[in-house]
Image (spheres, rainbow, N blue to C red):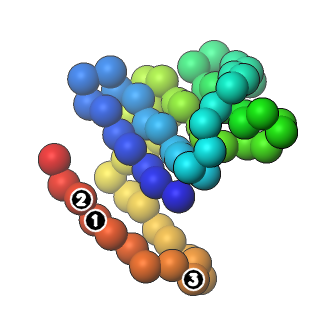
Amino acid sequence: MKLNYYPDTDSLYIDLSSKTSVDSREISPGVVLDYDGRGDLVGIDIDNASKKLDLHDLTINHVPAEVHIKSA
C-alpha cells in the first residue's frame, strides 16, 4: 500500500494494490474509488485532501509492514 500526496493538485492517492484500475466511482464530492477488472478496490483518490484530512498526522497501528518514508 502506498500513500501519495500531490501538493500541486492537493490530492492524495492511496494505492491499495499494484493492479491496474479499469473502473472508477465517485462516492462523494472529490472522493473516487478505483476498481480492477474483477471489481476489487485498488485505489482511493481524494481531491482537496488538505481540506478533508489532517495530512500532518499519520498514525499506523499494529500493521505488520515495513514502513518506507520518502520526502519531497
Nearer-the-camera pick, 50 or 46: 46
Residue at position x 62%, y 45% in the image: 19
Between the residue at mark 3 and the residue at mark 2, the CA separation in whole angstroms equals 19 Å
Element type at mark 1: loop
Q: Along the line of sight, which residue is nearer the eye, 13 or 49?
A: 13
Q: How many marks?
A: 3
| Figure check: 66 above or below 45 | below
Residue 39, how many percent across, how many down? 83, 37
Picture coordinates of residue 71, whole percent (x, y) = 19, 55
Q: Position of residue 25 (x, y in %)?
A: 73, 21
Residue at image point 72% right, 34% down: 35
Q: Is residue 25 above or below residue 38?
A: above
Answer whether labels 1 and 2 touch (C-beta < 8 Å): yes
Q: Secondary structure at mark 3?
A: loop
Q: Give left or right: position of 6 versus 3.
A: left
Instruction: Residue under label 3, please give it.
Output: 64
Q: Is residue 2 above or below residue 26?
A: below
Please rate how many residues cluster around mark 3, counting C-alpha atoms within 10 Å: few if below 14, some from 14 to 19, many from 20.
few
Measure how far apart labels 1 and 2 are at the Cα level: 4 Å
Residue depicted at x 73% and y 42%: 41
Residue 69 is labelled as 1
What kind of residue is marked 2?
A: Lys
39 and 56: which is toward the camera: 39
Labels 1 and 3: the sequence-earlier one: 3
**Circle 2 is placed at which residue position?**
70
Q: Which mark is residue 33?
A: none
